[in-house]
Image (cartoon, helix red, strand yellow):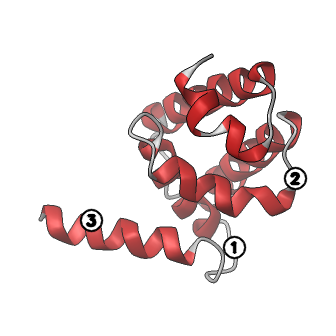
Amino acid sequence: MSEFHKEVGTLFGLSEQQSERLEQGLNQLEQEFAVASNVEDHTFSADYYQKFTQLVMQSGLTEDDIEPLVNVLYFSDDHQQVATYIVPSYYNSGGDRAVFSDTYQLMMEELQQSM
C-alpha cells in the first residue's frame, strides 16, 4: 500500500488504483506548473484548475471533496507544493475567495514566517 493511499486515499474512500491515478496526476500537475512561464495568466489558471478538477473527478472523488482534498494535500510533505499551486490558480481564474480560505490563510502565515 502506498504512502499516498494511506495518507490521502483512505480518507476519501479511494481504492489503491484510484489513489495511484490521483497521485500520478498531481505529480504531473506540479511539473506542469513548475515549467510554465505564464502562471499569473488568467487563462493558464483557469485551465490548470480545470485539469485539477477533472483529475479529482476521474479519480473517484466528487466536487464536495475538492476543498478537503486540497487541505489534506497541503499538510502532506510530498504534495504541499501542488496545493500551493492549485489555490492561487483557482483564485486567479475568478474563483470564490471563501473556497480554500483556511488553506490559503495557512499558506500566507507560513510565507510570512519564512521571510
> Which residue appears at 77% of the width and 57% of the height?
65
Crowd around label 1: few <14 · some 14–19 · many ≥20 (10 Å): some
Q: In this view, does 52 lie above or below 26?
A: below
Does residue 86 appear anywhere in the picture?
no
| Residue under pointer 2 | 62
What is the three-letter code of the residue carrying label 2? Answer: Thr
State the separation of the CA atoms marked 3 and 1.
22 Å
Say what secondary structure mark 2 lies in: loop
Task: Pick the quarter of the image with the N terminus.
Answer: top right
Q: Residue 95 carries which label?
A: 1
Rendered position, 98 above or below 11: below
Q: Nearer the viewer, residue 3 or 68?
A: 3
Separation of marks 2 and 1 at Cα, in angstroms: 18 Å
The amino acid marked with disc number 1 is Gly
Question: Residue type at mark 3?
Answer: Glu
Q: Which residue is drawn at 56% across and 59% down?
A: 71
Q: Is residue 108 above or below residue 54?
A: below
Q: In which quarter of the image is the C terminus?
A: bottom left
Q: Is residue 87 visible?
A: yes
Whichever of callouts 3 and 1 sits on the residue coming sooner in the sequence is 1
Numbered label attached to residue 110: 3
> Looking at the image, is 6 positioned above or below residue 2?
below
Residue at screen point 55% across, 61% down: 87
Query: Which of disc 1 and disc 2 is earlier in sequence?
Result: 2
Residue furthest bottom as drawn? 98
Category of crowding for the residue at label 2, using alpha-carbon neighbours closer than 10 angstroms: few (below 14), some (14–19), many (at least 20): few
Query: The residue tagged with tag 3: helix, strand or loop?
Result: helix
